[in-house]
Image (cartoon, coloured by chain):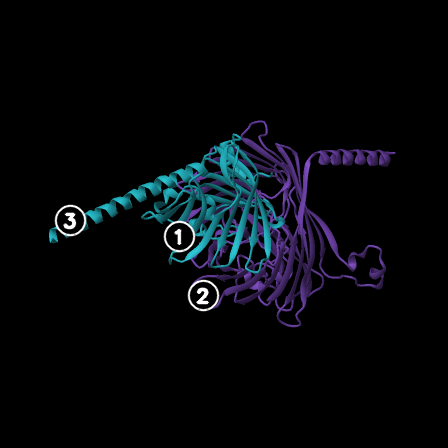
Chain colours: A purple, B cyan
Amino acid sequence: MFRYRSLVLGWIVLALAFTALARAQVSLNGYVKTDVRARIKGNHRLTWNENRLDLKLKAHLSDRAVLTAESWVRSFGFPTAARLEDLRYRDRRAVLPWSVDLREAYVDFYGFLFSNLDVRVGKQRIAWGTADKINPTDNLNPKDFEDPLDFGRKLPVNALRATAYAGDWSLEAVYVPAFTPAVLPPPEWRLGQEATLPLPPGVQVVGSKNTLVLPPQTVKDGANLGFKISGTLAGYDVSASYVYTRDDMPLATSVVFEPTSQTTGVVSTRLSFPRYHVFGADLAGEFHGVGVWAEAAAFVPTGEILTTIVLPTQQGLVTTSEVALKKQAFVKYVLGGDYTFANGLYLNGQFVHGFYGERGRDNLQDYLMLAVEKRFLHDEVKLRLGGAAQARSLSDATDNYTWIAFPELSYYPVDNVELVLGAYTIHARGETTLAGFAGNDEVYAKIKVSF
Amino acid sequence: MKRHLRFVSLFILTTFAAAAALAQNDGNAILKKVEATLNAPKDRVAIMSMKLIDKNGNVKNRVVKIYQKGDDKRLIRFLKPADVKGVGLLVLSDNEMWLYMPAFHKIRRIASHTKNENFMGTDFTYDDMAQTKYSEKYTARVLQQSPDSIKLELTPKPGADVNYSKLVMVVDPHNWVPKRVEFYDKSGSLKKILTNSRVAKVDGYWTVQEMTMQDVQAKHKTVLTLSDVKHDTGLANSVFTKRFLRRSE
């Protein structure tokens, strides 16, 4: 009976939704994208195999209310079939893996209660900051490291966002009720160095397990809150922001060696997500004809995080603790500029202090990013050469560095069609955050057709 | 005799100088009339179709909705093609331009180095799109005058931040609308030709309904056609804000 009622209720909701949409002015757009990548070195293994259908729906419910929804239907990855039964199974995902991802779904209310107040409710991306891709002030959406080529990608979250306008200025308030952790990169694209445990001679780690301690989804523990004031000052677009958030990348709070025999054991790790107050500011404008931007955020941990470590020694298991995160503010910042020369050559550069996943004043590293771009044949062809370099410090730059070059050629033969051919080559030596990328040189080909 | 010659020379020089000054004054006055005609409506809303035609005759299409108020405020929003739908340009002056890219969820201020770039693949630069008052940056003088056309030469004022060494504008004296404008690059070579073809009165205002910008060096042209033109609709200043630029339509 209950099931029957639910079914009827579901149909009524669907019917109402379709009726509302039928009355509304609806548009459906999107794109189809195919993206294939392969390793340059070795046996040229395919590493990425994606077909994506992006569907974006916009329904103008009235002059003052617009519904937006975007979803990805993806055929992504490679067959994972391991047994004959997997090939026979009715769910063909082991052969043809696919997924559906609701990227965004929100409603905009313009002039909500007051003429100068706009409200957006639903799953959304709240993109703060003026820098390119790396935005220290952008902390309301968790990071999405699924695609190493798209490292600025973030996960949309359910949020209530209200923006009040007064002249050139606006005040934005955002409430994110639930905590969502980041999607971490695949192991071969890990950030930072893998920790090694100081074990006595002869003792071996034969396995590992971990437990993520997600915060309770309560207002106190799970919710994020942000405020931003934006405007124009002396010809520059400026903003100042405050966010009460939780780190979306986990931090180890305990590392325990659990013996499985006299000489072997399993390492058990517990990880949690530290809380921060984040005070941010940014500006964008031009200086003597050069486009400039600056963005900085001071992260203030709400408490010190200790990592409890239990390790075997000659005297048996010994418990110690280390400070994983001091209760001390640390500042990440980006300084950037761009310029287009008279011949159309575009140059973009950024200096980044503090990358994703880096925490604590002593652990922030410096990065230099450069890109040169030139368009030909009235924007029909675009050639871009990007590069990034990281050195742990200038004094040992020859021993500890990473540099990455990524040339890319885009061709737009007809409206709505983009063909891309590119590659990235990575060189690393010593210990740097990006050193784990070494050896991942790849070529890629993409085709995107918009509709 | 010598004294007589000196007098004649002085007379000729003075006459030419006076004529040149008069031509310049007339030129500036004509340019003001042209601007007054083009910017006469209090505001304008229109759909603009753009055909981008390359030297092989291949065509790409763009459709934008354009809002204009007075002679400085403009908001342009792309409706087609799909891959640029929603992209918007807000122009408050030639030093205040913002671009909204929906894919990045961000509004970005356009620095002056970008202004001479082609706007979304068209033959119009960002600066061309922002240009509504030539007289602020150029001095005009009359080159030729006939009952059906006036040819003006526009040269940049000292210190003016422009990308052209001069413009040659042919004005129709019956409606004070330019029929043709030639744009010369910094080296003095002809770069682009703007031709205004269909000119008609809409809501009592002379309106260019079709214009072609031809890049003679790149052998590429853009044909703009205006439709659904509405004037004096009472556009609020709030339309010309970053808030509205970001807003879905």
Give the SS element for disc 3. Answer: helix
Task: Say which residue appears at 33% left-offset and 48% top-offset.
Answer: B159
Of badges 1 and 3, the one in the foreground is 3
User: In the picture provided, is B151 more to the left or to the right than B125?
Assistant: left
Label 1–label 3 contact, CB within 8 A: no
Residue A324 rendering spot, x and y as whole percentages: 55, 52
**Same-chain status of marks 1 and 3:** yes
Q: Which residue in the structure is indicated by mark 2?
A: A396
> Which sits in the foreground, B121 or A209?
B121
Mark 2 neighbour density, 10 Å: few (under 14) some (14–19) many (20 or more): few
> Label 2 amino acid?
Asp
Q: Compare marks 1 and 3 and give the one earlier in the sequence.
A: 3
> Which sits in the foreground, B106 or B51?
B51
In the image, farthest residue toward the front = B1
Of badges 1 and 2, the one in the foreground is 1
Task: Say which residue appears at 27% left-offset and 45% top-offset.
Answer: B19
Residue A48, above or below A175: below
Q: Chain of mark 3?
A: B
Q: Which residue in the structure is indicated by mark 1?
A: B164
Label 3–label 2 contact, CB within 8 A: no
Mark 3 neighbour density, 10 Å: few (under 14) some (14–19) many (20 or more): few
User: What's the distance in space between the residues labelled 1 and 2, CA to CA?
Assistant: 50 Å
Residue A334 appearing in the image = no
Residue A367, above or below B204: below
Quadrant of the rendered structure where residue A14 is?
top right
Tell me the quarter of the image containing the C terminus of chain B.
top right
In the image, farthest residue toward the top = A113
**Same-chain status of marks 1 and 2:** no
Residue B170 appearing in the image = yes
> Label 3 amino acid?
Phe
Q: Which residue in the structure is indicated by mark 3?
A: B7
